[in-house]
Image: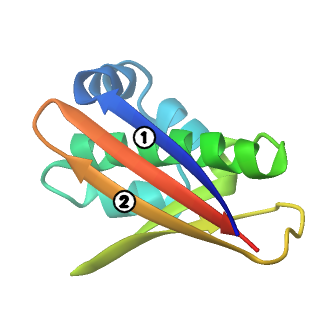
Amino acid sequence: MEIYIGTDIVENKRIQQAYEKYKDKFLTRIYTQKEIEYCLNKKEYIQCLSTRFAAKEATIKAYYQAFKEILTFKQIEILGHKNQPAEILLHNIENHCNFKIKLSLSHEKNYSIATVIIYTA
């Protein structure tokens, strides 16, 4: 078994500034519609957006290590579930068999962080 790890940390202020400056243009370039709806319905929506941004960056890093392919932000969808861990869905990728992907998210007032682990057989 091979293990590939990606991690990323984001200053929440950076995502807030991008959102305030570009609004929907920023959101639709980075996030899927489900992600946008999920985050904008949260009280702390900037932290939600920031955490997903970090998760996408971490996924890009781990996926490149595993498969030598660069994903785009929109190919990666981070789905939130009430009282359950978030999960990653990958869209429009080559069929790489026998891999699992795990995600850990965390945020606080100023920073959001994500770690992604890909396991290949």
Q: Which mark is residue 54?
A: 1
The residue drawn where x is 41% and y is 31% is 23
Residue 62 is at least partly visible in this image: yes
Most foreground residue, 95 or 36: 95
| Count of labels in the image | 2
Q: CA distance from mark 2 to mark 1?
A: 10 Å
Percent position of residue 28, x then y: 56, 42
Residue 82 is at least partly visible in this image: no
Percent position of residue 34, x then y: 48, 65
Most foreground residue, 102 or 10: 102
Q: Secondary structure at mark 1?
A: helix
Quarter where residue 105 is shown: bottom left
Q: Is residue 54 above or below residue 81?
A: above
Q: Is residue 36 left or right of residue 40?
A: right
The residue drawn where x is 36% and y is 29% is 19
Q: Which mark is residue 42?
A: none
Percent position of residue 12, x then y: 25, 30
Q: Is residue 49 above or below residue 109?
A: below
Q: Is residue 18 above or below residue 8?
A: above
Residue tagged by mark 2?
A: 104
User: Which sits earlier in the primary sequence, circle 2 or circle 1?
Assistant: 1
Residue type (three-letter) at the residue carrying disc 1 = Ala
